[in-house]
């Protein structure tokens, strides 16, 4: 509040900060729906054109063989304040594009893994990935109409989730619900960070 | 299969034609920016209202300067201009080299002793 009438020269504002969280899960779990529900405008789509150099594979020199793939990522923006912006990135399809996940996961505050109880196993790779990286994550069970409802305990057991990983139900189409998921994630990420720092310091 | 001497798996067009042409044409064949790395969430702001007069700039450079009159991330620029991210990074490198845009790299959340950032986001989400 001391900055009310600052003596800094005009133009030297507070440096803006961009943060990101990821939304992962199996195909059709509702990633883009959730990204759209929480974003301030409809989700944007960005594409990475991957070539062998992009993938980091050294092919035999002189061999003219360019394999290119286009990977689309959907993302949205939530402007928290003039100098704080949160980006929500849907991760591209599992399995083939782990190296892109690595790029996305660097610096991410955390991740939401969307689960669909009709195809629960589809989110195993995402859970494995974030566990392996140490990225804080929550699992949000997207409640599709017509899908059988399971108890959270049953789902937790089926996913073999660590007890400290938050597990919650959501409706990925609803802004309120999606926002609740993000808040749960941020709280969990903050807690995880604190306990890690305490562990490192003590 | 009968009499078909051109099985689908031998078609060249899949690997050698297509979207790779346009992005590299836009960057005049360059795959890497002259300067900078440009994270997807690096924030870009134009330093001038207009870049039309600059020599050596293409329409995409000018479009980026126009777009970043309001702060945008690298990912947003790519999405709004419908260009691959790699292409946008090259163009941004050109613009940074000419001081036409300012880039704010994201902070490392792990490296900053700053719980207040988390709290600010949580409070911001609650207030939306």
Image (spheres, rainbow, N blue to C red):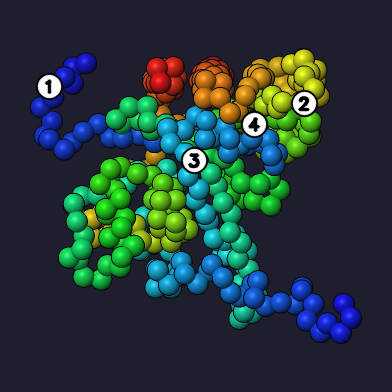
- Disc 1 or 2, which lies upstream in sequence? 1
Disc 3: host chain: A
Residue depicted at x 75% and y 37%: A122
Q: Is residue B48 above or below residue A3?
A: below
**Looking at the image, which residue is at 58% across and 59% down?**
A70
Residue A57 place in picture, x, y as percent: 63, 64
Q: Which residue is mark 2?
A: A147
- Between A200 and A39, the one nearer to me in the picture: A39
Mark 1 on the same chain as mark 2: yes
**Cα distance in 3D space between marks 3 and 4:** 18 Å
Q: Position of residue A190 (x, y in %)?
A: 50, 20
> If the image is split into quadrants, where does the C terminus of chain A sit?
top right
Helix or strand or loop: what does disc 1 sit on? Answer: loop
The numbered dot on residue A43 is 3
Of the numbered discs in the image, which one, if any, rests on residue A113? 4
Between marks 3 and 4 in the image, the one whose residue lies nearer the viewer: 3
- Check the image and report above or below for A172 versus B8: above
Please rate how many residues cluster around mark 2, counting C-alpha atoms within 10 Å: few if below 14, some from 14 to 19, many from 20: few
């Amino acid at each position: 509040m001391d900055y009310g009438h600052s003596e800094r020269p005009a133009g030297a504002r507070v440096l803006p900060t961009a943060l990101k969280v990821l939304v992962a899960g199996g195909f059709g779990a509702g990633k883009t729906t959730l990204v759209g529900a929480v974003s301030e405008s409809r989700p944007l789509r960005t594409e990475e054109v991957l070539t062998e150099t992009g993938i980091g594979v050294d092919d035999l020199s002189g061999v003219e063989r360019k394999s290119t793939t286009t990977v689309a990522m959907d993302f949205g923006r939530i402007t928290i304040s003039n100098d704080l912006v949160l980006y929500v990135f849907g991760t591209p399809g599992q399995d083939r594009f782990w190296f892109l996940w690595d790029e996305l996961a660097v610096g991410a505050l955390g991740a939401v893994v969307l689960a669909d109880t009709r195809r629960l196993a589809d989110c195993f790779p995402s859970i494995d990935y974030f566990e392996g990286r140490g990225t804080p994550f929550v699992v949000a069970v997207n409640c599709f109409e017509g899908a059988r409802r399971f108890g959270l305990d049953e789902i937790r057991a089926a996913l073999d989730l660590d007890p400290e990983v938050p597990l919650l139900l959501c409706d990925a189409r609803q802004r309120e619900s999606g926002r609740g998921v993000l808040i749960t994630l941020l709280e969990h990420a903050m807690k995880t960070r604190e306990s890690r720092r305490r562990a490192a310091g003590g | 299969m009968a009499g078909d001497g051109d099985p689908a798996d031998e078609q060249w067009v899949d690997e050698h034609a297509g979207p790779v042409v346009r992005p590299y044409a836009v960057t005049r064949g360059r795959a890497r920016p002259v300067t900078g790395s440009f994270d997807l969430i690096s924030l870009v702001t134009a330093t001038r209202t207009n870049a039309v007069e600059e020599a050596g700039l293409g329409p995409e450079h000018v479009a980026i300067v126009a777009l970043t009159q309001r702060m945008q991330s690298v990912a947003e620029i790519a999405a709004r201009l419908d260009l691959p991210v790699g292409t946008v990074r090259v163009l941004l490198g050109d613009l940074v080299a000419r001081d036409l845009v300012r880039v704010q790299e994201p902070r490392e959340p792990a490296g900053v002793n700053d719980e207040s950032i988390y709290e600010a986001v949580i409070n911001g989400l609650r207030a939306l």
